[in-house]
Amino acid sequence: MAVQETRGDDTPQHRLPVLFVAENVTLAQCVRLVTLASALDPARYAVHFACSEFSELVFAGTRFERHAITSLSPEAAARALEAGRRLYERADLLRYIDAERRLIDAVCPALVIGDFRLSLSTSAQLMGVPSAVLINAYWSPYATRSAFPVPDHPILGWLGEALTERYFPRAIPHVFRHFASPLNAAREQHGLAPVGDLLEMLSHGDFTLYPDHPWLTPVEGEPKSHRFIGPVIWQPELAGEGATDPELEQRLASGRPLIYVTLGSSGPAALAALVVEALATLPVIAVVATAGRTRLPNAPSHVLVRRFVRGTDLARRAALVISNGGSTTGYQALSQGTPVLGLPSNFDQFLATQAIDRVGAGCSVKAREASVERLRAAICRALADPALLAGARDVAGRFAERDARSHFRAFVDEVTRPRRVTGNNEPSPPRPTLEHEA
């Protein structure tokens, strides 16, 4: 195994390579892994990071060994989701597996960790390397839920909302098998057993790590290889003029409540204009972070438009955070005790919004039903509802109990710890059993 030596009397002679692979169809996949990778002890681990793009906004200050690897583009993913199509077919995943096996062979990692890289656990299994997958607990096969929400889908235009709501639960098993069939076919070609349906595919690995709190997204009957590590919170490190915002400080001197708006890298970009129009007549100060996805030239003076912001800092000062409903911004807001107004469109966003609304820490408007009037009314209700603020503060307290970085660091230490012989020549307790060793 290729390793990199370190110097110093108190450091190991060799660092263990740990490989992170992100399918960066949204920013969330990269930033979550970057945040966790940064938590590892650099004297003990050599971090290798693979994705299709390396934005300095995300990787600033890191010293990872970076590897370029093919990934589905955000635009292609968005088109597939809007059309209700699968993101990958068997040939796509076979190419992924080939690329990942070459990468694993070059790095020789002690552990591989992926975020929405659906083929990675198969590649690791073929190479005899333990794998972990990062996936929100609301996607778990063991999640406790009453029903699945209906995401935006072309079928709504054919059947309408009422009929789709009625028949969607019956279609779910077929849909989940349909979306998992390309990976199962790719595994069969490599002589491996199928993983199951969509939920089992998303959580497949020797270990499954939930970046959540079990109170917010509970699971039941899960195996010991499934671990809650806690919400992974990230914000960009902005330098120079981007680190401060004198114009915002001047506006906030008016005493008006602050609203932070971001639709992330996967919310419908056209929604931003609707939100700005809804805010135009309200007595608030708003900051809209666009991530460069849309231009808002007609925003009123009390609505500040920025490309990137330090979201956690803004959420801490805000009275309300408006997002696409996903867990990345939602958890960022809740970590600061700030309620969330979610505008979900895709399945993941609906599941995250469902969890947040259920505990009384937020409210939502379906993106497909959003209008200026509905958004304005929802914003006013959220600002006036003390129960939402209390719910968000309750979640913040629970989030503070579970630090993702320290839990992740302990997990990697445990999994990569070598077995040692005790003084009585008996082996120490074994590490957790890996799926492909069972």
Image: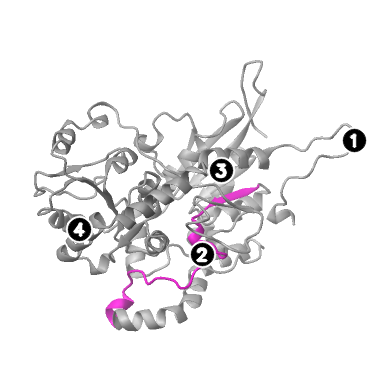
Give the CA separation, mark 2 to mark 4. Answer: 48 Å
**Residue nearest the viewer, comparing 404 with 118:** 404
Above-or-below relation of 393 to 157? above
CB of mark 4 within 8 Å of CB of mark 1? no
The outermost residue toward the top is: 9
| Residue 103 image label | 3
Tell me the amino acid under the disc marked 3. Answer: Leu
Q: Quote the CA–CA distance across marks 3 and 4.
A: 51 Å
Q: Establish if 268 lies above or below 110.
A: below
Residue stretch rendered in magenta on the structure: 130-158
Amino acid type, callout 1: Asn
Q: Which mark is residue 425?
A: 1
Q: Is residue 427 left or right of residue 364?
A: right
- How far across and down, in percent of the image, does residue 322 sit? 27, 53
Labelled pair 3, 2 in contact (Cβ < 8 Å):
no
| Residue occupying image coordinates x 41% and y 28% | 61
Disc 4 secondary structure class: helix
**Residue at 68% across, 35% down:** 1
Q: In this rendering, is residue 110 above or below 93?
A: above
Residue 380: give its label: 4
Which comes before the other along the chain, label 2 or label 1? 2
Q: Residue at x 52, y 39 (%)?
A: 405
